[in-house]
């Protein structure tokens, strides 16, 4: 497995502001993903973070709202832009380790509350 | 598209009771199947997996068998503990993506 950390672990933000969430892995990984878990709901894939190129977004998610960076094989950021209360969720990053086809390991999550 | 259906919760059991959480899936091809667990205030942990038909995944006393004929991957445990109280997610892996079920809350009372 891998050790995955996220910063911040939680935050309370004002409407209209932006928050950048960091995901750091202790080893190089082939793939990184960002998920959203709205209160009491399941996980929804936001995007695949591609190293050195633009992220691949799922239907319903756009780069202007959720810009993602992945400068190397161990680090990625997700920004939640121009936040509204509907963005209050847990945001999780996950990784696929080399050789473990579609088996994903998750970070601890970032709990975001937007007032 | 691919989808996962889990039994609705919450499921409330007494300690040492038998647990079953039903999970069925719809998918093209031959997906891998997973159970993840989310303890209160924590992220998701992979509990067990199965990658092909008739495989049985097991971990910490939990088991699930990949049944292609019934497109199911039901989670079972013979004797639950209070510490098993958590949300359990069934998921299928298609390509490099995971599709999650809605999650089932398990509450175990002493």
Image (cartoon, coloured by chain):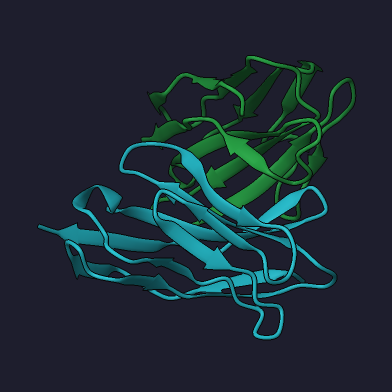
In the picture, measured across the screen, residue B22 lies left or right of residue A115, that is right
Q: Is residue A40 visible?
A: no
Q: Is residue A46 visible?
A: yes
**Residue B32 horizontal/vertical position (percent):** 72, 59
Q: Which chain is green?
A: A
Q: Nearer the viewer, residue A11 or A16?
A: A11
In the picture, measured across the screen, residue B6 lies left or right of residue A51, that is left
Q: Residue at x 73, y 27 (%)?
A: A68
Q: Is residue B72 above or below residue A11?
A: below
Q: Nearer the viewer, residue A27 or B78?
A: B78
Q: Is residue B30 above or below residue A12?
A: below
**Residue B74 horizontal/vertical position (percent):** 51, 72
Q: Residue at x 20, y 52 (%)?
A: B82
Colour that chain B carries in the picture: cyan
Q: Residue at x 74, y 50 (%)?
A: B97
In the picture, measured across the screen, residue B100 lies left or right of residue B93, that is left
């Amino acid at each position: 497995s891998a050790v995955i950390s996220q910063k911040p672990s939680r935050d309370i933000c004002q409407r209209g502001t932006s928050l950048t969430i960091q995901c750091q892995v202790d080893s190089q990984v082939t793939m990184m993903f960002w998920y959203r878990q709205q209160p009491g709901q399941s996980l929804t894939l936001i995007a695949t973070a591609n190293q050195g190129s633009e992220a691949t977004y799922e239907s319903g998610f756009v780069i202007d709202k959720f810009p993602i960076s992945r400068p190397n094989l161990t680090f990625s950021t997700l920004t939640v832009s121009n936040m509204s209360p509907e963005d209050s969720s847990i945001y999780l990053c996950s990784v696929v380790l080399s050789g473990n086809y579609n088996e994903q390991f998750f970070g601890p999550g970032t709990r975001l509350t937007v007032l | 598209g691919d989808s996962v259906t889990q039994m609705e919760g919450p499921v409330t059991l007494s300690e040492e009771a038998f647990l079953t959480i039903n999970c069925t899936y719809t998918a093209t091809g031959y997906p891998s199947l997973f159970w993840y667990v989310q303890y209160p205030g924590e992220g998701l942990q992979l509990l067990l997996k199965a990658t092909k038909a008739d495989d049985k995944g097991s971990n910490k006393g939990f088991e699930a068998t990949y049944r292609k004929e019934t497109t199911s991957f039901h989670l079972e445990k013979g004797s639950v503990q209070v510490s098993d109280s958590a949300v359990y997610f069934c998921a299928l892996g298609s390509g490099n993506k995971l599709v999650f079920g809605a999650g089932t809350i398990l509450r175990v009372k002493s």
